C-alpha cells in the first residue's frame, strides 16, 4: 500500500509513513488488527493520562493491509443478517495521526539489535516491540479447499473465515433446498474464534427450519468434544442433539473433491485411527486448519510451536524483556478471540509502560480471560466466558445462567459489540468485562 492512498484527512500520517521505514521508534507494534490497534492506543493513552504525551511518531504500526475487518461479524454475514462491507474500515482511517504507519509487512526480527525486518528488506528500529501479527490460515493443508472456495457456486463449499467467502456462505445456505447432507467442519487444533464452526451450523439450521427446508446437518470436528470448557461443552452438545444435528468427533477434513461433491475425512483417535472416510455433501462449510505465521515460526521470538514466546501472566517475552505480544500470534494458552484481547491489552499496557518508565516490568497479571459468544439460532446466544484452566469467569453469571441461550446475549453480540469494537476497543477504551460491569456494581 503506498502512502498516496492514505486519507487526505491524515496528512501527518502520510508524512510519517513515508519517512519512518528504516528509522527508529520508541514503540513498534506489528499488526494493525484488533490487538495492535488496541495496544497502540492504550499505550499512548496511558502516557497522556499521566500528562506525559508521547511525540508524534514515537509509536509506529507496521501493517500492509489496506482494510481492517471486524472478523467476528463474518458469522453474522454468513447467517444473512448483515452485509460484510458494514464490518470493514480502511486501516489508515483507524490509525491515530499521532502514530507512524509503516505500510509494509514485517518479515523477521533481530531482537538482539532491536530491529524489525520489513518486506522490502529494510530494517526498523525500536526501543520496545509489541507483536500482534495474528494467525495463519492454512487453506492448502486441506487438498482441494482453495479451489472449492474460489468457485462461485458449483462447488457448494464456503467458509466464514474469509472476507471473500463470508457472503458466499449465506448464498449457499439461502439457496440450499435440502438435497444432500449439510456438513460443517472444525479442524483439530487451534483456530481463531473456536466457537464459530458450530455457530454457523446452528444459524443455518435455524434458517432452514424457519423456511421449511428439509435439511439435515452433521457437525464433524477434529476435537474430542464440542467445546474446551466442560460446562459449556455439555450444554452445547445437548443443544446440538436437540436440534437434530449429528456430531462426529476426532475426525478431520483432509480433502475436498468438489466435482463429485465429496469430502474426505481422517479419523484421529480410537480403533479406526488413520482411517479415511468419504462423505457426500449437498453443502459444505469448511474451516481450514490454522497455526503460527511461518515468518514468526522461523524467528528468534518463537517458542517450539511457532508462537511468540511470552509469559502467560505478564505478556512479556521470556527472553527479550523489551518485547511483548498479545492476541492470536502470542503463546498465551487461551482461546484466540477479540474478547481475549480486551483482557490482555490493559495488562500489556501497564507492564510495558511501567517498564518504559522505571526499567522494571509492571505487576499486572493476565488470568486468561476470554469469551466466545455462540449463536445457537436466530434470536438466541450462549455466552461462554472463561479463563486459564477452563474455569468459568462470567460477567453476568450472578444474575443468569450463561450456558442457557437467550435473546439479550444475542442482541448484545449482534448489535452492540460491533459498534463498541470500532468506537471503543480499537481506540484503547475497552478494558475487558469490567467495562460492562465495573466491580462496584456487582453484588457481593
Image (cartoon, helix red, strand yellow):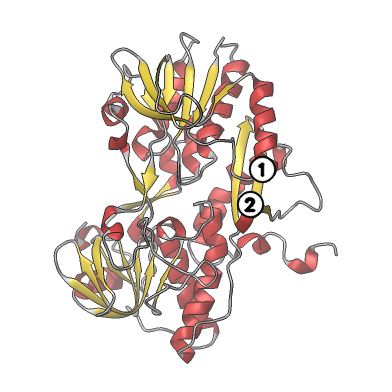
Q: Which residue is mark 1?
A: 230
The residue positioned 59% from the left and 42% from the top of the image is: 414
Q: Say how many tags the image has.
A: 2
For label 1, count other residues whose C-alpha is less than 10 Å away and answer few (under 14), some (14-19) or many (20+): some
Residue 157, labelled with which disc? none
Between 46 and 120, the residue placed more toward the observer is: 120
Picture quarter containing residue 434?
bottom right
Q: Position of residue 376 (x, y in %)?
A: 63, 32
Residues tagged 1 and 2 counted as in contact (Cβ below 8 A): yes
Residue extending furthest toward the bottom: 358
Question: Could you tell me residue 4's position as x and y percent?
Answer: 20, 60
- Residue 268 lies, in percent from the top left, at 45, 32
Label 2 belongs to which residue? 390
Helix, strand or loop under label 2: helix
Tell me the CA gap for discs 1 and 2. Answer: 8 Å
The tag earlier along the polypeptide, 1 or 2, is: 1
Amino acid at each position: 500500500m503506498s502512502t498516496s492512498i492514505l486519507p487526505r484527512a491524515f496528512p501527518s500520517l502520510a508524512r510519517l509513513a513515508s519517512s519512518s521505514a528504516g528509522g527508529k521508534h520508541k514503540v513498534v507494534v506489528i499488526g494493525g488488527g484488533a490487538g495492535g490497534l488496541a495496544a497502540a492506543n492504550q499505550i499512548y493513552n496511558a502516557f497522556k493520562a499521566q500528562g506525559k504525551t508521547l511525540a508524534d511518531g514515537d509509536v509506529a504500526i507496521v501493517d500492509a493491509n489496506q482494510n481492517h475487518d471486524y472478523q467476528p461479524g463474518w458469522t453474522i454475514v454468513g447467517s444473512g443478517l448483515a452485509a460484510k462491507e458494514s464490518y470493514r474500515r480502511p486501516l489508515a482511517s483507524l490509525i491515530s495521526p499521532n502514530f507512524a504507519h509503516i505500510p509494509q509487512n514485517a518479515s523477521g526480527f533481530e531482537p538482539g539489535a532491536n530491529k524489525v525486518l520489513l518486506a522490502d528488506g529494510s530494517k526498523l528500529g525500536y526501543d520496545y516491540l509489541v507483536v500482534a501479527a495474528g494467525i495463519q490460515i492454512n487453506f492448502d493443508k486441506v487438498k482441494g479447499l482453495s479451489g472449492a472456495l474460489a468457485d462461485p457456486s458449483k462447488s457448494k463449499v464456503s467458509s466464514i473465515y474469509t472476507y471473500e467467502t463470508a457472503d458466499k456462505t449465506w448464498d449457499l445456505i439461502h439457496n440450499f433446498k435440502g438435497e444432500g447432507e449439510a456438513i460443517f467442519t472444525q479442524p483439530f487444533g487451534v483456530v481463531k474464534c473456536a466457537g464459530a464452526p458450530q455457530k454457523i451450523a446452528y444459524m443455518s439450521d435455524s434458517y432452514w427450519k424457519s423456511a421449511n427446508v428439509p435439511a439435515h446437518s452433521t457437525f464433524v470436528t477434529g476435537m474430542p468434544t464440542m467445546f474446551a470448557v466442560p460446562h459449556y461443552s455439555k450444554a452445547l452438545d445437548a443443544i446440538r442433539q436437540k436440534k437434530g444435528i449429528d456430531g462426529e468427533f476426532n475426525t478431520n477434513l483432509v480433502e475436498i473433491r468438489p466435482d463429485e461433491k465429496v469430502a474426505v475425512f481422517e479419523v484421529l483417535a480410537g480403533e479406526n485411527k488413520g482411517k479415511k472416510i468419504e462423505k457426500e455433501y449437498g453443502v459444505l462449510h469448511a474451516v481450514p486448519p490454522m497455526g503460527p505465521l511461518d515468518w514468526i515460526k522461523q524467528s528468534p521470538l518463537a517458542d517450539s510451536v511457532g508462537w511468540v514466546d511470552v509469559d502467560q501472566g505478564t505478556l512479556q517475552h521470556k527472553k527479550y524483556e523489551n518485547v511483548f505480544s498479545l492476541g492470536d500470534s502470542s503463546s498465551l494458552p487461551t482461546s484466540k478471540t477479540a474478547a481475549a484481547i480486551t483482557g490482555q491489552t490493559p495488562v500489556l499496557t501497564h507492564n510495558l509502560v511501567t517498564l518504559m518508565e522505571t526499567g522494571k516490568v509492571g505487576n499486572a497479571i493476565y488470568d486468561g480471560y476470554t469469551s466466545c459468544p455462540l449463536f445457537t439460532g436466530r434470536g438466541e446466544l450462549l455466552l461462554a466466558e472463561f479463563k486459564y484452566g477452563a474455569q468459568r469467569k462470567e460477567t453476568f453469571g450472578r444474575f443468569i445462567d450463561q450456558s442457557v441461550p437467550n435473546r439479550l446475549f444475542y442482541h448484545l453480540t449482534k448489535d452492540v459489540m460491533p459498534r463498541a469494537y470500532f468506537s471503543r476497543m480499537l481506540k484503547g477504551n475497552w478494558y475487558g468485562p469490567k467495562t460492562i460491569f465495573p466491580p462496584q456494581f456487582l453484588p457481593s
